[in-house]
Image: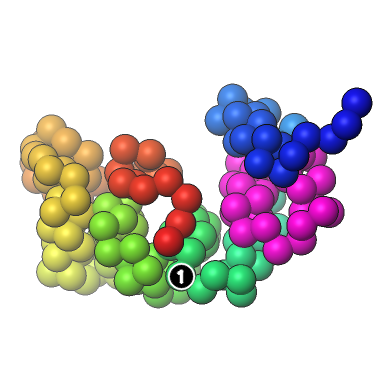
């Protein structure tokens, strides 16, 4: 059986990832990277697969490689920041969220998670500003029943990025 073209292998790896088969995704992604070591999307998804398997340091390292290829890769800045948030490194995470938002100004998840980092740092006014930025791209984002604000109107932690908050697929 002939190997799949890279685009099909990547699509299959993403399918494995979304179905929770992270080690299967990792195998395919590493095969892609054997053929094309600087494939930024494969590196991004490898970081995602490693993170999902709890291999945080390896995931962070995998995310940094595509940034050397494309420093404007907003999703990778965002995922790097989320890893840093998990380990309580809020200042470092904030810097990555800011890079993501500068690279892709309409990336609502980056703005929303930036608000989480700012909130953790006690910078409430800036957190509110970041939430307003997110709402510009996702109408109703700040509704009392919507994501980001609990019933008493205070900031709530936000889960991993959702596709509906990222208006573009891939990267710019």
Q: Which residue is drawn at the image coordinates 34% and 63% (left, top)?
A: 104
Instruction: State the image quarter where residue 151 is shown.
Output: top left
Mark 1 = which residue? 72
Would residue 46 be counted in the magenta stretch? yes
Visible residue check, residue 88: no
Percent of width and height locating residue 69: 61, 71
Q: Which residue is drawn at the image coordinates 62% and 59% (left, top)?
A: 40
Secondary structure predominantly adopted by residues drawn in magenta: helix
Position of 99 relative to 52 (above/below): below
Q: Which residue is drawn at the image coordinates 18% and 70% (left, top)?
A: 126
Q: Is residue 133 left or right of residue 106?
A: left
Percent of width and height locating residue 99: 39, 72
Q: Which residues are magenta?
A: 26-52
Render colour scheme: rainbow
Position of 134 relative to 49 (above/below): below
Visible residue check, residue 52: yes
Instruction: State the image quarter where residue 27 is shown.
Output: top right
Mark 1 surroundings within 10 Å by alpha-carbon count, few (fewer than 14), some (14 through 19), many (20 or more): some
Instruction: State the image quarter where residue 26 is shown.
Output: top right
* Disc 1 secondary structure class: loop
Q: Is residue 99 left or right of residue 34?
A: left
């Amino acid at each position: 059986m002939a190997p799949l073209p890279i685009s099909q292998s990547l699509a299959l790896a993403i399918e494995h990832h979304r179905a929770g088969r992270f080690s299967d995704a990792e195998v395919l992604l590493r095969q892609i990277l054997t053929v094309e070591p600087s494939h930024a999307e494969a590196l991004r998804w490898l970081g995602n697969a490693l993170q999902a398997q709890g291999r945080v340091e390896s995931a962070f390292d995998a995310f940094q490689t595509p940034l050397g290829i494309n420093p404007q890769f907003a999703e990778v800045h965002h995922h790097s920041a989320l890893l840093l948030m998990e380990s309580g490194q809020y200042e470092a995470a904030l810097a990555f969220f800011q890079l993501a938002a500068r690279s892709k100004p309409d990336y609502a998840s980056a703005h929303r998670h930036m608000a989480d980092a700012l909130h953790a740092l006690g910078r409430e006014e800036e957190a509110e500003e970041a939430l307003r930025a997110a709402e510009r791209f996702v109408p109703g984002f700040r509704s009392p029943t919507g994501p980001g604000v609990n019933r008493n109107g205070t900031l709530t932690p936000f889960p991993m990025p959702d596709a509906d908050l990222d208006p573009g697929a891939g990267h710019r």
